[in-house]
Image: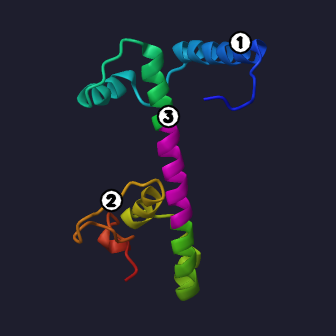
Amino acid sequence: MNHNHPQSSDGKHDDDSALSDFLASLMDYTPTIPDELVEHYLAKSGFQCPDVRLIRLVAVATQKFVAEVASDALQHCKARQAAVVKDKREKQQKDKRLILTMDDLSKSLCEYGVNVKHQEYFADSPSTGIDPASRDE
């Protein structure tokens, strides 16, 4: 496939050098997701690789994906609670906690092509897990 963009050997060398430097830096990096966990799920899917750099590359990509999903879910949560503020202004003034629900997470994951269905009995109420004496119902 010729794109009519001749690549100089210097450009290719720079790309190779940058890739080599990045892969070398993965040896010194400790990802949030442990290597053993990544290896387990890769093995479970039928992928075996003795190269620690590749395992850590998958861990970094997974960490980025989880961070983006969490950030998007936070935005959904803030938008949902901003809509509640319009309805219940006085109660919302004293309770400014952000409560992430499965609906927030489901909407965020849906943007990435992951469809999550949860049972109707799932604890999705903002008051779930709060001491009954402290509820203002």
Q: Residues within 10 Å of mark 1 (few under 14, many from 20)?
A: few
Q: Disc 1 marks which amino acid?
A: His
Q: Is residue 68 magenta?
A: yes
The residue drawn where x is 29% and y is 63% is 117
Tag 2 near tag 3, CB within 8 Å: no
**Amino acid type shown at disc 2:** Val
Q: Counting other residues with Cα less than 10 Å from the Cα at mark 2, is it few (<14), some (14-19), or many (20 or more)?
A: few
Disc 3: which residue: 61
Say above or below: 38 vs 97: above
Residue 68 in the image: x percent, y percent?
Answer: 53, 48
* Start-end of magenta stretch: 63-76
According to the image, label 1 marks what residue?
13
Magenta-span inclusion, residue 25: no
The residue positioned 30% from the left and 24% from the top of the image is: 47
Point out residue 65 in the picture as x, y percentages from the top left corner.
Answer: 49, 43
Tell me which numbered mark, 1 or 2, is placed earlier along the sequence: 1
Q: Measured along the vertical axis of the image, is residue 68 above or below residue 127? A: above
Q: In the image shown, does 101 or 115 lie closer to the viewer?
A: 115
Image quadrant assignment for residue 89: bottom right
Residue that label 2 marks: 116
Where is residue 33? Give x, y as percent.
42, 30
In front here: 4 or 96?
4
Marks 1 & 3, CB-CB < 8 Å contact = no
Residue 80 lies, in percent from the top left, at 51, 73
Check the image and tell me how it is coloured: rainbow
Which quarter of the rendered picture does the C terminus lie within? bottom left
Distance, label 1 to label 2, CA atoms, is 44 Å
Horizontal relation, residue 93 to residue 56: left or right: right
The answer for how far apart the CA atoms under marks 1 and 3 are is 25 Å
